Amino acid sequence: MTDYDLIVIGAGAVGENVADYAHKRGLHVAIVESELVGGECSYWACMPSKALLRSGHVLAAARRVDGSAQAVTGSLDATAVLQRRNRFTSDWNDAGQVSWLEGAGIDLLRGHAVIAGERVVSVDGVEHHARAAVAVATGSLPMLPDIPGLADSAPWGTREATSAQSVPDSLLIVGGGVAACELATAWASLGSTVTLVARHSLLGGVEPFAGEMVADSLRELGVDVRLGVTPTRVGRTDGTVTTQLDDGTTVQTAEILVATGRLPRTADLGLEHVGIEPGDWLHVDDTMLVAGTDWLYGVGDVNHRALLTHQGKYQARAAGEAIAARYLGTPLHDGLWGAHVATADHAAVPQVTFTDPEVASVGLTEQEARDRGMTVRAVEYPLGSVAGAALQADGYTGRAKAIVDEDRRVLVGVTFVGQDVSEMLHAATIAVVGEVPIDRLWHAVPAYPTMNEIWLRLLETYGRATD
Ligand SMILES: Cc1cc2nc3c(=O)[nH]c(=O)nc-3n(C[C@H](O)[C@H](O)[C@H](O)COP(=O)(O)OP(=O)(O)OC[C@H]3O[C@@H](n4cnc5c(N)ncnc54)[C@H](O)[C@@H]3O)c2cc1C
């Protein structure tokens, strides 16, 4: 048995950050990984999906500006796009991230980790003891709905859809969330004939107009978007997937991608050895400490607070610092917005959906703010009416919405939909997290002519500043 101060299970982006922050405080840290160091984001999620999308976005942007539009007459070179995506995943080789761990002074234990008891982690049968804590950062897995024939039809999950080495002639996507919409955009732009079926509207969880605009744009891209529909039976014969839908129609495609949500990756972790139900999300406090324990932490996707890499890394900083503070006996700052808590998880999670148009949002939707009992005022403005946006693309279509808590006169949520809005999101995040008073926001002057002048338009729509 080797002793460490901290053992982190899972070397995705989140686990790496927990390990790094604790190590920088002087803790002796090991990290366990059963697959690739770097996890889902590096190899089968954020990076490859954004690499698949980027070339299509650039081409569409060039086509929307008179002058450059005349210069781009061809379609995407799908082979080159796939090769560029391969480079972003280092051809699914984690040597670069392993050497980062080595340089950081963190021990890598390759193998499958099981929690064998309190502060004891068994890696492929070899036990290790953690003096301070064990942090679980094992992420999440795609959910496979119980549809007759689906499991036997070799469906794609998000891993297959982000790592495929050729473009399928046709693709049925089941699901209407972020991954489904992004991958529909990517594969349609690469030349696949895409059908997307979703039980509800697209992009639940953000302002409804965002999902509507994305549905319209997917249709313009040639995607057959069918809402309010679910598959009832799936079968694969001779390379063709036949899917029956509950509206009585049948779709035949080369591949089927299921993107209907995620499950916690906790079923085979040995949690039952420490009295925790396996297969469930880990319930944690704001320092990421698992309920009912003083040594087990759950960080990133596995705690289901926000299934996003950046938010998981933010939690990882809080957890790594809190583990070190508790172990070393230094002050613990666990009040609201303290150094050892992930307060923003509750109020200011930024998220970008890299469709075309992009959807960038932070904080609460109007409905969420009302559900929390706030006195809400919502302000909307068409982004295309801003000079900077009109310059960005001829006929720019986009929309912005800001949610104001009228009692405190601060922003609690902002949504932008439009081309290139992702890079505008962080200003909104700062305004929401900083609880910047509306009257002070008038003094944050956006440069002319940039798309950020949307801030001025939103303020003017909200009303004059008070004296
Ligand atoms: C298609 C897609 C696109 C996405 N795009 C974005 C995006 O653009 N931006 C964004 O912020 N988020 C995005 N996400 C979400 C993001 O990928 C996740 O939030 C993030 O990967 C979670 O990181 P994590 O470290 O918690 O888990 P993971 O990255 O899943 O890492 C967990 C690690 O733990 C290892 N592991 C699991 N069990 C064990 C065990 N018992 N023993 C040893 N090792 C184990 C796994 O092998 C894995 O390497 C996307 C997700 C998908 C599916």
Image (cartoon, rainbow, N blue to C red):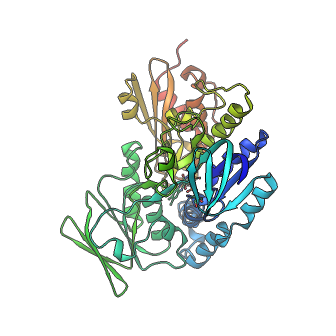
Find residue 166 and report its horizontal and vertical position in percent: 52, 79
At x 57%, y 38%, the residue is 288
- Against 378, residue 59 (above or below) is below
Quadrant where the C terminus is found in the figure: top right
Find residue 318 and report its horizontal and vertical position in percent: 64, 37
Foreground of the two, 156 or 99:
99
The residue sitting at the top extreme is 467
Find residue 379 and report its horizontal and vertical position in percent: 43, 31
Foreground of the two, 303 or 373:
303
- Against 328, residue 100 (above or below) is below
Can residue 71 be seen here? yes
In the figure, residue 249 lies in which quadrant? bottom left
Find residue 411 and report its horizontal and vertical position in percent: 51, 28
In the figure, residue 375 lies in which quadrant? top left
Q: How many marks are shown on the rendered structure? A: 0
At x 45%, y 78%, the residue is 168
The residue sitting at the left extreme is 248
The residue sitting at the bottom extreme is 238
- Against 418, residue 230 (above or below) is below
Quadrant where the N terminus is found in the figure: bottom right
| Ligand 1 falls in quadrant | bottom right
Can residue 451 be seen here? no
At x 64%, y 70%, the residue is 92
